[in-house]
Each structure stands twice: as structure tokens, then as C-alpha cells.
Image (cartoon, grey):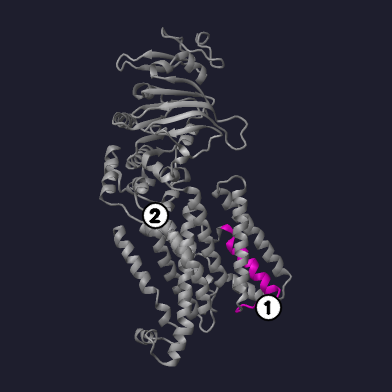
Amino acid sequence: MTRRRRLAAVGLVAVLVLPLGLFVGSVGLTPGEVLAVLLGGGTPTHRDLVLQFRLPRLLLASILGGGLALAGATFQALLRNPLAEPYILGVSGGAAVGAVTALALGWAGLASWSLPLAAFAGALLAIVLVFRVATAAGRALDVRVLLLAGVVVGAFFSAVISFILAVSDARTIRSAVLWMMGTTAGADWRGVAVAATYTIPAALVLLSLARPLNALSVGEETALYLGTEVERVKRIAFAAASLVTAAGVAVAGVIGFVGLVVPHALRFVVGSDHRILLPMSFLVGAAFLTAADTVARVLLSPTEIPIGVVTAFVGVPIFLVLLRRSTLR
Amino acid sequence: MRIEVRNLTVRYPGADIPALQDVSLTVPPGTLFAVLGPNGSGKSTLARTILGAVRPEEGEILLDEAPLGSWSRRRMARAVGAVAQSEPLPFPMTARELVAMGRYAHLGPLASEGGADREAIQAALERCDVQDLAERRVQTLSGGELQRVRIARALAQQPRALVLDEPTSSLDIRHEMAIMELLHGSAECGITVLLITHHLDLASRFADRILLLSEGRVAAEGPPGDVLDPTVLGRVYRWPVVVELDALTGSPRVVPVRRSTPPGPATTGGAANGPDTREAGP
């Protein structure tokens, strides 16, 4: 199959999978019923189910999944490491410290509005900390230092989390663990608005940097000779990708593997041109996470599986198969 | 393009000794200018400073009379094509995609390659004899094939100057000669070529002028016949050499002396720490 065909096939599947979450659930809906609701009709029960429950959840999962995959693809290009993922710079650790602190001090419950705020603040703290370390030595942003600083800061944050959990009561621990596994269960329109506000503009910025990211993936020196403003592109791209990740973590906790598996797998299927890879990562990431979200809702209904668990269950085997096939070639 | 370097001193952060000290040179348009020197003598630093990747401590660099700082990266990439010593290739991509990157500086912010760009890419692939490798993944290419693809990318930039850091280091003789002929031909068409190489004989046969660097300073500069002096080379490389005029090409040929070989009839360069050839052998 040519690359163009594979691209079309993957795109088509993603577009078809994307809206499935609207139909599937404890109450099955036909496409006609969903369409009626979206066009302003339908029964009150159906309207409630779709507009207050399934649609915001679908949109949230799409924005988060798309954002995480896009951020992952960006980190991979910037760090020139195909195994980089959105949380590699300690963003998730920072967010978790914020969230767990808020939970332990009783400032916030799992469903309260202040939890995302605390998580977002923690994520931003991690980003600023890691950036300050990586730019301290000289004026240039050194990606190797950035990577190391991210890992070390992440390790420090997980120690802080362990400490807080060690002195917390059982209820707080349960809430914290659930949050850290990632969940879209509490999705509402406010969460959608928060995620969209940060993700959409940052995503557009990243999409506009596709060509410089291509150049950067063959090294900063060569990128410079190809006409790239290397320092500027690196800083903007890191900041935008971190912001997308931070917003995602703040709204739905740590959802692993989307940001690693989706862009990495897509590189095999559609190639490494970021002008194609970045938008495809967003689309496929969105489809992947909405599908995972639907599975999380339906599989053990009425109990919900944390979505992070589903993405790991699905993502890891896919990743291993791809890894094996890629080394065979 | 005219490349001028005046009194350049470069010091890497934290280094006691400057990597380059008071280096000056002028490369007129259409010249093939070779930079020679032992490992660590500052050749790559010189190229990277001229290309704006390293900031000098002192001195100035003028490209077509305009200071380096006045060139935007984009404008510079349309005028100067460069091949760095090496580059990471962490992601799968085809040779054509790699060469297409040479067109980035010519494209509008969100535009994709047009007909003229595709022609430039194809022409560059053909000039470097890699058109048959265009759809291959760069990770599957041999060292020499990859090197030719990278040179093709620099040509696809359609530059007025080329700066190449050891471009022929992993090429077989056919492709080495082909690339040198190509660079020579480019220079004859008015493109300025700054070539860093360890290959003294290629520099001797193809270069219009040679700069010899030694521990960050200029040891000699001029036409090959003047610079390739056995005494100077022996001192700079710390190994005795014989320089003879090649009967076939008429250009100077540098032959490093073996420890066991007695010095030949040609003049031998002495070396302070090198082996003493006169005492070697049975």
C-alpha cells in the first residue's frame, strides 16, 4: 500500500471511530436518534443523555487525546527521541503534586472546580522549574539538560506525592490514586471549555511549526543551516506542548500512552513529515482516546475503569507489535 | 558570494585556550577554498562560526560585505548551503524528503513545494548521482550514499556559497572524485566553495587556495603549491612528509613518510616530536 493510501485509510478509520461514543453506552442510541438530538429534537431523555453526558465527554476525550498525541509528536521531534512522551519533562508530576496537595488539605474533592486549578498550577511550576534549569548554563536551550532536568524534577515530585499520601487518610489516598490514573468520568461543558481554551490555540501554534520541526529532527546545527530560527522554534514549541499537556492533566489527570503510542505508531504508517504527522496525530489521538473512553464506560458497566488503564491495556500491545515489526524490517 | 573573516577569535564556554585565534581569510566569489589542518586545529569551528552556529569572541565575518549578524537565518539559507560533519536521523524518512528540506528557506510560511522546488530537488538528486536512492529510507543508506544525499540537500538550496565539513570522508574514489568535480564545477559557475578536508591531495588537485590551520591559528595560506610545503606540513602535522610533483596531474602530492622508509630524494619535512626517519630502519 502506498503511503497516500495508508494515510487515507488511517484517517477514514479515525473519523469513523470518533463519534462512536455518542451511540454506545448503557442505553444504545441509533445514529438517527443522535442526529435528531444534535439538530435540536429528540426525546428529553435522549437530549439529556447526549448533550449533558455523552457529547461533553466525547469532546473532552477528543481534545485531550488529540492534544496529548500532538504534544508527544512535538516532544519526540524536539528531543530527537522517538520514545519521548508528553510527561517526560515532569509536567504530570507537577500536576499530581498540585492535585494531591489540594485533596490532602481538603481544598478540593474529585469533582470540585479547584482541583484542575491546583493541578494546573503544579504543572506550570514543573515547566518553569525545568526550563529555568535547562537555560541557566547559557543562553541556548539545551535539550539534553532539559530532558535530564525533567526526569529529575519528576522523580522529586513523585517523592513529594509519596510523602503526602503517606500522611493522608484512606479516602484521600483513594481519590488521589483515581485522579492519577486519569479519568474523564466527571466531564462537563466547563471541563471541555477549559481544555479547549488551552489546547486549541497551542495546537494551532504547533501545527504551524511543522516545517521547522522537520528541520529540527535532523539536529539543531543542520536545522540552523536550513534556515530555521532554532532557539525561537524550540522555546515556542516546548512551551506550547507543555501547556497542552498541563491543561490535559489538570482536567483529567494523567492519561498515559496516548502521547507515546499514537505519534510513534503514525511515524511508521504515514512517515515523519510533521506537516502530515502533526494533524494526523491530533486526529488519531482524539479517536483513540474517545474509543478508550467508551470502553472505560461500557466494559464493566456500571463500574467505570480509569481511562488511563484502558489506554495502557490497548496501547502497550499495539506498541510492542509495531516495535517488533519495525525491527524486522 | 564573497566570504571575509577578519581577526576571528573563538572560545568555547569554559575553555582556557581559544579554539581559533586571530584567523583572517578572504574567499572571493567562484573560488574553491580548502581548509586543512590536524584534528582539533579548529577547522570545524571555523566553518561553524562562519555559518553562525558558534558566536565569536572577537573579530568579524562578512558575507558579501554584510556582517553575519545582519543575515536572517532564512535569507542565509537561501544564499549558503552547508553540510555539517554529521547529523542525527532518529526518524524514518526518504532520501527525497531529506533533500526537500533544502527548499524550506525558499517556501512561504505555510506553502508546500511547487514545480520549481521539485525541479531543484530532482536536479540536486541527479547531480549527486542519488536519483535512484530517492525513495529509499535514509536509515538504510550506506555512509557514502547518505553523504551524497546530504550534499544534494545543500545543492537543492540553490546557494551562492557552499560550506562543507569533510564531505568526502566516507566516499569511495568514484564518488569522491565525482563530488570534487562537482564542487570544482560549482566554483567555476561562480559559487564560492569552502571545503574542510583531511585529504591533502584532493585539496592540492582541486582547490584554488588552501588555508592550513594549526592549533587555532593560521599556519599558511595561499595557492596549493605554496602551502603544501614539507617543512610547514611536517611541523603542523608533527609527522615527516615528502612533497613531490605528481607526474600525471602536475600538482603537489603529499606523502607521509613511514618509520622504516629512508627519506627519498625529495625534501622531507622535519617534526619536533615525530619519528626521526634518518635513524629508522636497519
Helix, strand or loop for the magenta stretch, by majority: helix
Q: Is residue B150 visible?
A: no
Give the magenta range.
Answer: A89-111
Number of residues whose C-alpha sits closer than 10 Å to that of mark 2, classed few (under 14), some (14–19) or many (20 or more): many
**Mark 1 falls on what kind of element?**
helix
Q: Is residue A14 visible?
A: yes
User: Is B132 situated above or below B271?
Assistant: below
| Number of the front mark, 1 or 2 | 2
Q: Position of residue B86 (x, y in %)?
A: 44, 39
Q: Position of residue A64 (x, y in %)?
A: 49, 69
Q: Amino acid at mark 2?
A: Ser
In the picture of the structure, the residue carrying the numbered disc 1 is A171
Per the model, the C-alpha gap separating discs 1 and 2 is 46 Å
Locate the N terminus of chain A by quadrant: bottom left
In the picture of the structure, the residue carrying the numbered disc 2 is A272
Q: Position of residue A125 (x, y in %)?
A: 63, 61
Seen in the image, is B56 located left or right of residue B180? right
